[in-house]
Amino acid sequence: MSDIFSNHLLTSRHALILGLLLAVLGSISASLIQSDLGDVEVTDITIAAHNGETISALMYLPPNATEKTPAPAVINVHGYVNQKEVMSNFSIEFARRGYVVIAMDMSGHGGTGVIENDGSRGVSDVLKYAHTLPFVDSNHIGLVGHSMGGWSSVTAAVNHPELVRTLIVAGSAQGGHEVEFMLGAPTVSDDANFNFGVEFGKYDEFVAINYFDQERAVDFVESHWLMAPFGASEPVILDRVYGDFASGTGRMATQSPETHAGVHQSSVAIANVLKMMNLSSPAPVDRDESNQIWPYKEVATSIAYLGLLLFMFGLVAQLFRTSMFQKLVQPMPTTQPMHPTLYLGFAGLIIAAVALLMVPLQMTAMHVFGANSLFPMLFANTSILFFGTVQLIFLALFVAYRVIRRSESSNFWVTHGLSTNSATTEFDWRYIGRAFGLSFLVVAAGYLLVATVYQALNVDMRWWMLLIRPMEPHRFLSALIYLIPFTAIFLVNGLLAFGWLRLRDFGGGIQTSVIWSSALFFVNASGIAIIIGIQMFSLYTYGKPYFGEVGYDTLMVILGNGFIPLLAVTSIVSTLCFRKTGNIYTGAFLSGMLATWMIACYQPY
């Protein structure tokens, strides 16, 4: 890794220090923005569930909310495969306007345990808890739920209408028992004794599981599932107030130009939700809906995320210089690079295979293997089976290629980075132990940094859905099991990238490292980007998803957004470690640990 940092303006020590500063200062800035420069008190709280489990939540307490002047409250509920932090953009803006906010982790998500046989997934328990708070106006408690959080909020409101003033769902709907996708939700009647609002993105991918009689999100206003609770016999008119919010019979529907997950990053969607809540429970602090500061927090947490990565990259380079790990450093083995035409041909095959197999392989994995006690994280399992199968396919292609080209060098273990000695064929377990130890120390240091920031400031390091956060104890134990298959995937990926599809040296360490990293990222991630691109093209051109009629297949494409930054990080790590050590082991261990952490930290189960 010295070829990147040494003898350049940015040394490994500078990278480590700069990364640490960016991670800490970005997180402090995010915390200040989240608390409206300290005016809002943000605390991590634990709420007792009715079955003995605990519910993890963040409470945002504005200065106007006191026992003498209780304030209206909003319970924010995230969607499937998310956590309370993803709703921070809504939470920040509600709290700035004087609402008490409780952003909760649903059942099986984040720090909340599994609450069996509860269609509200813990929302009912949080709703009851909010009514016990002396600084909350119990006559003005609202629910805001995104996606599955919307269904959960509908269930809580229908079961406890006397506890709810206003229910707003974003990217979600009422009803849904007719479709066998995560149970749906009860039906909100037109005479339900609470206000009801709907925010639905113009390009929402999940129209088929929320408004079953429509194919395009823009047409959700014509759906029976929207018109029924509005008591309307004709398509609902957007932004029009139906009924009376002051008396608890109000109904309103809005639409922002967003995808399903895009509402979290939408000033328009957030303004629409603020407006509907304000009609029912006027904000104690008068601020225009367009006055929003949450984007600055997104910038700050993004800077913190990048700082964390830079910190870990710098730490890797520093550790290679220590007496304990200097023995890992070896020259790269020399081998004949693959001809550019052949390289492009095989790279094209890999990209095409990833694109073609991404959705069907994961859907097959979900239905055939699902989740179990040993591997309890459903979408970690689908990821492993998808990426693992792709690697095995091309490992078989590689073997066939080797058989055909018998004239190649016989020093296979050295030239393909499998030997622990780049000069001779050798496999030393002590070397493997050192490689694993270096990787563990780097990830442990990064984890300690993230956990310290999270504990002290109540912010994670993220941009939108792309995040890294501490893991709860049960996730950590599962992660130790997942480390094995993820590391195996990157061992094969490194063998194929640096032993088979080897590029030529482009002169100059940094130039070659950048080109190799970029090429590996392009090969690994382009197929995923193609699928996401096709989905977005279909949504923005035809108004409906190309992939997805029943829900999970659409979800696979959305989750693909998280694979791309992960593969960017692992491509850099794998390349730099191979060029520093002459073999694939350190890069595979480090990539496997990072992938396990980044995937396991947010999986529900």
Image (cartoon, rainbow, N blue to C red):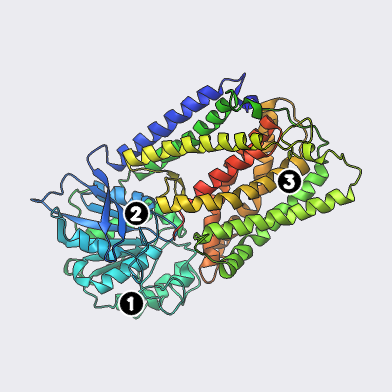
Give the quadrant of residue 296: top left
**Among numbered discs 2 and 1, the one appearing first in the sequence:** 1
Q: Position of residue 318 (x, y in %)?
A: 55, 25
Of helix, strand and loop, which one carries label 1? Answer: loop
Q: Position of residue 535 (x, y in %)?
A: 57, 60
Above or below, 36 against 321 in this view is: below
The kind of residue on which mark 2 rests is Ile
Q: Position of residue 32 (x, y in %)?
A: 30, 37
Give yes or no for contact between labels 2 and 1 (Cβ–Cβ under 8 Å).
no
Residue at the limit of the structure toward the left, as seen here: 68
| Label 2 CA crowd tier, 10 Å (few <14, some 14–19, many 20+) | many
- Residue tagged by mark 3? 496
- Quadrant in which the C terminus is drawn: bottom left
Closer to the eye: label 3 or 2: 3
Closer to the eye: label 3 or 1: 3
The residue at the point 83 percent across, 53 percent down is 400
Q: CA distance from mark 3 to mark 2?
A: 46 Å
| Label 1 CA crowd tier, 10 Å (few <14, some 14–19, many 20+) | some
Q: Which mark is residue 270?
A: 2
Pick whichever, 274 or 16, lies toward us: 16
The residue at the point 23 percent across, 43 percent down is 41
Residue 344 located left or right of residue 581: right
- Residue tagged by mark 1? 187
Residue 368 located left or right of residue 277: right
Above or below, 78 against 338 in this view is: below
Of helix, strand and loop, which one carries label 3? Answer: helix
The kind of residue on which mark 3 rests is Leu
